[in-house]
Every structure is written in C-alpha cells, then in structure tokens.
Amino acid sequence: MSSTLRIRLLGTPEIHAGQIIPPGSLLVKGAALLYYLAATGQAQSRDLLAALLWSDLPEQLARKNLRDVLSNLKFVLGPYLLIARQQVDFNPDMKRDIDVARFVAAIAAAAQAATPDEEAAYLRAAADVYGGTLLEGLYVPDAQSFEEWLQVERERIAQLARQVLHRLCEYTLANGAYLEGMTYATRLVAMDSLNEEAHRHLMRLLVASGQLSAASAQYQSLRQLLRDELGSEPGPETDALYQQLRGSQSRSLAPTNAVPAVVRSHSLPAVPAIFIGRSNEIGQALAALHDPRCRLLTIVGMGGVGKTSLALQVAHALHAEPASEHRRFRHGIFFVSLANIEPTRDTANGQRRDTGSDQRLTTAIADALGLRFSTQESFDTQLLNYVREKQLLLVLDALEHLASAADYCARLLGQASGVSLLATSRSRLYLDTEHVLELNGLAYPEGDARQEDWDSYDAIRMFLHHARSMRPELALDASERAAIGRVCALLNGLPLGIEIATSMARVASFQAIAEGIAANIEYLQASHHALPTRHQSLRAVFDHSWRLLNLEEQRVLCQLSVFRGSFNSAAALQITGATLPLLTVLVDRSLLRRVLPGRATGTEYEMLEIVRQYAAEQVADTLRSYDTPAALHDRHCSFYLAWLQARKSELRSRQQPEVVAALSLRIDNLRSAWAWAVAKGDTALVDAALDGLFFFLRCAAGFTKAPRRSAQRRSALPCCSRNLVGRRAIFFGLNCWPARAGPCSRPGSSKRPRACSNKVWRCSASSTCPLNCPFPGITWRRLLTIAAIISALKPGRRKPWRSASIAATNMGEGSPRRC
C-alpha cells in the first residue's frame, strides 16, 4: 500500500488510505488513538495512550485493551504505523497528510512573512484548511481524559481560526477585496454569533462594497440577537459604527463601488528563465522606481526592441524584493496590456481619433486588478476611488497608439498619490513628471571588433541562444560566424528581428538569411504563432509605427530615407523640408535617434538601416506629386557635393583636422551623393567635387605607405588600352584596380609610379578621355582619379580613405602635395 494517508480532523473526521476507511472498520477508541497521534504530531508511549483512553480501568486491563485496539489498527493501516513495544508512531517512510498540521504550519509561516501580501497568502491557506470544529461529532465513551484533552484542543484550534479570520477581514478591507472579506466575516459570525467584532467586520465590508442597506440590516440582526440571548444592547463601538454609516460619513466608509472579484498581489505574466543582456537598463529602471520622486517611468524604443520584456523583468525583480525594498508597492504590481485596444482613425486627415479610449483603459486596468464594477457610478470614478489609497505599480504596456493615454496617466497620478506607472511606448508621453528610459538594440560586433570577443556581444548571444534551442548540435565555422554577425548588424541588434531570423534557421543557412534581409525587409517572417500579430514580421512592426504617423510625418520619414548615416537638422531642412519639431516627433516615436553631437556639427540624427529600408519602400506611394525619388536624390547629391566643394580650401589650411573630422562623419552621405552623380553622369557635379573629395581622402589616409604587393600581383596590372579602355567598364570594372595596382611611390615624392603603372600613366597623357563615356571633356588622368574614388567609396570598405590614397596615387593624379 503506497497511497498517502490522509486524515481530516477539522470538521467531521475522515481517514483516507487510497480510499475512505469506513467508520466501522476501526474500533471507536482505535480511531480516537489515531486522531490523537495525528493531532499531536509525535510518537506516544503505550502507557500514556492507555491512561488517555481507559483512565477508569486498572493499568493491566487498560494495557490489554490497548493491545486489542492496536491489533485492529495494524490490520487496517499496518504499513502507515510503527507499533513498538514501548510506543506508537506513524511510519516516517510513508506519506501522510494531516489537515491540522497544515493549518498550524500555515499560521506559523504567516507569522514569519516578510510582507502583508505574503502573510495574507498563508492566512488564506489556513482558512481554506479549517473545515470546522476539531473532530466534530466525535464521542468516545468512557474516556474522560481524552474528552478533557479534546475540549482544550478544540478551543485552541478555534481560537487560532478566529484570529486567522479576523486578520483576513482586516486585510481584505484594507486592500479592497470586499467580497472575499465578507466570506471570512460571515464565517467568523457563524463561529461566534455573539462576537460583536465579527459583526463589525461584516458591516464595514458591506458598507465598503456599497451595500448600505445590508450593513444596516446586519446591525439590526445583531441588536436583536443580543437582546434575545443576553438582554443587552450592542456596545459603544458597534453603535458608533452604525451611526456613522447612517450619517454623512458613510461615503468615507464606502470609497468605491468597484468590488474585487479576486484578490491579487500581482498580475505579472511569466518571464523566460533566460534573459539576455539589458543588465544596465534593468539597473537604471530599478533605481528610478525606488526613487519616490519617480512616479512615471516610460521605456521608449522602436517596435521589437524588447520594451515589454524589459518591463516584465523589472516588475518581477521588484516583486521579488524584500518588503523593505519595495514597501511603496505594498498593494501589488499589476501588468496591463493595451496592445489590443484599437484606436479609431479619422480617414479625412489621417489623424488618430480615440473616442472612448479612456473607458477602455479603465476596463483594462480593472481587469488586471481583478475588479468588478457596479452600475451606480462611472467606471473611471470607481477605479479612482479604489486605487486612491493604494500603493501599487501599474505596468502599462504599449501606450503609443492611444492618443489620450498621456492625459489619462496624468489624471491617474494626480488623484492617486500612491500609484506609480511603468509604461512602455514607441513614443514618450510628454508629461512633466515623466522619466524616460530609451531602449536601443542589443550590442553587436562592428567594424574592427576582435574575433575572440565575438560571442560576448548580447545580440550574438541572443542569436546563438535561439539558434541552439532548435539546433543543439550547432557548431559554427568562420563563414557562419561572419553571417551571424552580418544578420545582427543588418537588424541593428533588434531582439525581435533576431528571434524571427533564428526561427528561419531550420530552412535556410545563416548566409542566406543575411542576404535575404539585405535584399528585402519582407524576408523576415515568423514561422511560429507565439508572437502577437503585430510582431509576426518586421514589416508588421513598422506598419504599426507607420499608422501612428500623420501624413506630414509620413512624408518626412520617407524623404529622410535618402540619408545614409548621420545628418544634421540643416541638411534635413534643405533636402527634405523637415523642421526641427518634425524631427523631434520622429525621434520621440523611435523612428530616428539622436547621436552624440560634435562641437562643430551640432545635434546629429540617424535612422536605423532597417527603418530606412522600410521608409524607402514607401517613397513612391507617399510622395506622389509632392516629390519624386529622383528629385530627392538630386537635392541630396547637390547638397553634399556642394558642401564638400566649399571645404576644399579648408583642407589645405590649419583647420584641416576639424574639417577632416566633419567630413569623416559624413562619409556615408558623401559616398551616396558621389555614387548618384557618377551613375547619373553629371559632369559638372563630378568635376566640381573631385578635388575636394580627393584631398579629403588623401588627408584622411594620413599618408600611410601602401603595403608592398608581390611581383605576381604587380604583373597582373592589365594594359588599359586592351582590357579596361574601350568600354564603359571603367565605371564598373575599375573598382578592382586598387587591389591590382602596384605599390605607390612614397607620398610627397617626385618620382612617378613604378613601371607596373607606367602603361596607365602613359595612357593618361592625352588631353581628353578617348572613351565614349558619360563625362565628356574630363581628362583621362582625372577620369582615372574618378575611377579610383569610385573604388574607394565602394560600400563595405572599412577604410575608404586609405584605399583611395593608394589607388589615386597609382592611377590618378600622381603624387599630390602633402595636405
């Protein structure tokens, strides 16, 4: 027999050993002996048991009766008992469950609880176990000592039960759990109908839940009971409470008609066992929320960056802290998801119109708190009345699409001084009391990152964690490591993008995933349905953000996609017409981000590549008659190449270091502008920008001597008249020349390039370009310089200025003067 022995002592006694033991199976005093063992929880001597059950008999006869009872017990419950010569006990190797033991243990745990919520949880457990009077209905004839013990023990257990119920009545009243509290108060009244304190508990709970008539009726019932039983009136405290509920103070006793359907200390969804990165952000959020001056913390970031996950980690960390650490949230921490509240949209002007969103916010918060509203007052009033005296934290997730959210939060904070808010949003709320924590993508390896540190980056760690959950045997070679690094870079460390990308690893190689992301944002589609609809793909994420913009903001976002890398407000205004307020809106909506400004450049802005890719796809449909992609690129090209030309003289002045730094910051935009001019064949723009761009690249190169190449590489330089001259291939094929050209002459030297480049040099002697190329009138020598710079500015080169210096010295203008 291996079933758990279950003994119920509270209420009508029962014994289970796999099945209910019928009352007739045990002798009456055998059952009493078993109950005594269970209630005391320890071994008992045969002498004590004999005296307890047969106190009126001689010792020898009592011991003989005890042997008969033990024989009966051994027959029915043998494996569960250890019946020795001197004592009787339960078999410690067999499982047993005794309700009195659980009841007493729960009360002891409540006394040691660190928080009121924890104490209440243990007290609830004790109240649930308490099923009534100890051994109710049990009568053991001719056992005076047992009856005396039972009476004392019954009173002790009943007193403990009354203390538990009293404490729960106080807790539920203080925490707004009125329905639950009324259950405990009713039980308390049933245990001792003449106890006025029990009646007062019930009256207070009835008033608090808005049931004034029922509270008055309860008082009248108590009054009549006392008259009938004791010939007395209710005491002063009870009478004062009744007069109070009848008078003008009744409203203060009934602050709300919202009634908790259930009592909760938190409503936090579970979080993954492994959470990668964000330790700094978690620390910042916890520090802010521990500060009483911070009552609104907004985690701001683009869609898919991990705002909700971070907020839940912070909330769970707060909930797990000792009471002394988060006493300001002693009434609980509650998660409120707002993502599924859909705003209506004014199709006439594209603006959002959130009719009724306040009520939907109220309903969502009430659901998280477990409230049930009455129909006597507005829901907003009932909610505010309920939380007004509470000290709690509401985690409001996904606020960005609710236009009235800021006003609602301000009103809630203003009328409930103990409430704090942790919000997540793609844009800030613009409240004076708001503290903002900006969230960016996870760190990923860039440029010159050391290979030995490759898997220490959080984005890489997240990628590998998800990938190995599907492919535990995953082993990476160099090409796969490079592909994973490229995926993380293309996604700017966006956690959602990484999660979706790894979900595709079942059907595609890491290299194919990287190529797919680079080609089209729609490549990433979640292969599982665990993610919400708005996170099933990156396009869905950006579609959601796009719909939150008005038409002017959408237009500006599309036009800003022409920029590469960082740009300042002056460039944005001249090229796209974007004003500073519009840029600020896009920053606040996490579609642009500010980068560290330089002393001379002022505030810089940057659009993440995945956002830029999405915005660029919207250009044709959004701009329409207002603008064209070609005109937009023309303005961008003209602005940056003219800006470069204006700084040509400064490159030869004492301002050279500052100018080189400023130009280096713009290298991506210069690269894009140059490529547009070359592809368009704009002779004037290319020729005007050539000198400035050439000298910038030479100065930025620092005149580092080019590495020597082998004779085999030097001999590979083709004759320009045979392989490279004669077709437009110079604009597509010469990007390989820097790798084929021989070593350059020492910068500043008057010597001409070595013999391997002499063919090129001789071909460049003619005054005009002999090719039928898109740059008529430009000398062949300058054309080679153009080709060198095209090569140097090829996307993906880590050090374009060094490549350009080598290439231009070998193939272009010879050896320019030292900058």
Image: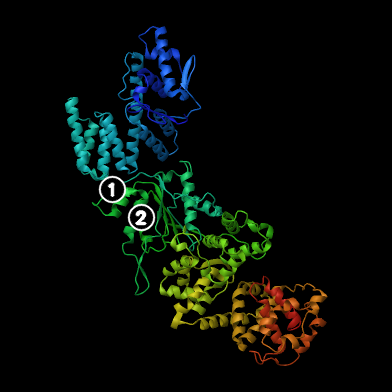
Q: Is residue 563 left or right of residue 763?
A: left
- Residue 246 at x, y percent in the picture: 19, 41
Between disc 2 and disc 1, the foreground one is 2
Q: Using the image as rendered, state which of residue 44 and residue 130 is in the foreground.
A: 44
Whether residue 41 is visible here, answered yes or no, is no
Please tell me whether mark 1 sits on a helix, a strand or a loop.
Answer: loop
* Residue plotted at (40% across, 24% down): 39
Q: Is residue 378 left or right of residue 270?
A: left
Q: Is residue 781 left or right of residue 570?
A: right
* Residue plotted at (31% across, 36% down): 184
Q: Using the image as rendered, state which of residue 587 and residue 294 is in the foreground.
A: 587
Residue of label 1: 256
- Residue 344 at x, y percent in the picture: 34, 67
* Residue plotted at (71% across, 78% down): 736
Query: In whole angstroms, how far apart are the C-alphas of marks 2 and 1?
Result: 18 Å
Mark sitting earlier along the chain (2/1):
1
